[in-house]
């Protein structure tokens, strides 16, 4: 029997885990292909640690191409069309056919949905935003810090709450916690509703 081709759309956490598990447990005559528009993989749970200076970008990121050492093919391209019934994907200028399709594209940020958010806010869901926020935090000496969840759904339901706790700890260690107010605003009916009521 000829080997099968598994197309994994997205090289984030879900795609990374799927590719590694498949490569570990299926025969080498089966192709595992990861397609992502980005060149690098970022371990997104560590973006909050990047924000408060407990990690740097080198510690939380790796080139996706490193997956090729494990026999996983990597294609860097923007996915423009998915035909799940035919297991066909258009990525860049290529049409790829597979026997199986795993869609793990994650969620895109939409800061433009709130006027002024892109220009005025710090977005810790991406490495450049987390680093920009870290730089600002080192100069921050007091005031009102607002963490805003603009709309649901959003990436990682725990992240805003973890961010507030990390910021509280960060400000306490800097000795300025008494010089600021730290607030979180969310359209959710309660903190992290996916976990259910306390």
Image (cartoon, rainbow, N blue to C red):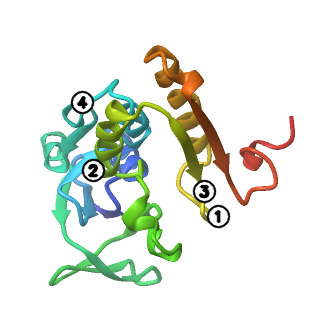
Tell me the crowding category of disc 3: few under 14, some 14 to 19, or many 20 or more residues within 10 angstroms, Cα based: some
| CB-based contact (under 8 Å), mark 3 and mark 1 | yes
Q: Could you give the CA–CA distance between mark 3 and mark 1, rounded to whole angstroms?
A: 8 Å
Is label 3 or label 1 in front? Answer: 3
Q: CA distance from mark 2 to mark 3?
A: 19 Å
Disc 2 secondary structure class: helix
- Of residues 34 and 180, the one drawn nearer to the viewer in this rendering: 180
Q: Which mark is residue 149?
A: 3
Q: Residues within 10 Å of mark 4 (few under 14, many from 20)?
A: few
Q: Residue at x 26, y 63 (%)?
A: 36
Residue ID for mark 4:
59
The residues bearing labels 1 and 4 have C-alpha atoms spaced at a distance of: 30 Å
Distance from Cα at disc 4 to Cα at disc 3: 27 Å
Considering depth in this image, is 136 or 75 the residue closer to the camera? 136
Q: Please tell me whether mark 1 sits on a helix, a strand or a loop.
A: loop
Say few, some or many: other residues with alpha carbon within 10 Å of mark 2 (under 14 / 14 to 19 / 20 or more): some
Q: Which mark is residue 128?
A: 2
Q: Secondary structure at mark 4?
A: helix
The residue to which callout 1 is attached is: 152
Q: CA distance from mark 1 to mark 2?
A: 23 Å
Quarter that holds the N terminus: bottom left
Residue under the point 30% across and 46% down: 132
Q: Is residue 132 above or below residue 75?
A: above
Q: Earlier in the sequence, mark 2 or mark 3?
A: 2
Q: Residues within 10 Å of mark 1 (few under 14, many from 20)?
A: few
Disc 4 + disc 2, Cβ < 8 Å? no
Query: Which x, y percent locates residue 71?
Result: 17, 46
What is the secondary structure assignment of the residue under circle 3?
A: loop
Q: Nearer the viewer, mark 1 or mark 2?
A: 2
């Amino acid at each position: 029997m000829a080997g099968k081709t598994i197309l994994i759309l997205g090289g984030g956490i879900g795609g990374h885990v799927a590719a590694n598990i498949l490569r570990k447990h299926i025969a080498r005559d089966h192709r595992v292909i990861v397609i992502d528009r980005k060149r690098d993989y970022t371990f997104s749970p560590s973006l909050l640690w990047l924000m408060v200076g407990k990690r740097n970008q080198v510690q939380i990121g790796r080139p996706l191409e490193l997956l090729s050492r494990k026999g996983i093919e990597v294609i860097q391209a923007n996915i423009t069309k998915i035909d799940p019934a035919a297991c066909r994907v258009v990525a860049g200028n290529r049409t790829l056919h597979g026997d199986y399709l795993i869609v793990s594209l994650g969620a895109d940020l939409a800061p433009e949905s709130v006027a002024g958010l892109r220009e005025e806010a710090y977005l810790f869901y991406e490495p450049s935003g987390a680093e920009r926020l870290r730089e600002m935090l080192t100069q921050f000496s007091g005031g009102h810090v607002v963490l805003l969840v603009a709309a649901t759904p959003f990436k990682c339901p725990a992240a805003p709450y973890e961010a507030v706790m990390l910021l509280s700890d960060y400000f306490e260690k800097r000795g300025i916690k008494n010089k600021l107010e730290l607030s979180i605003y969310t359209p959710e009916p309660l903190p992290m509703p996916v976990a259910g009521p306390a």
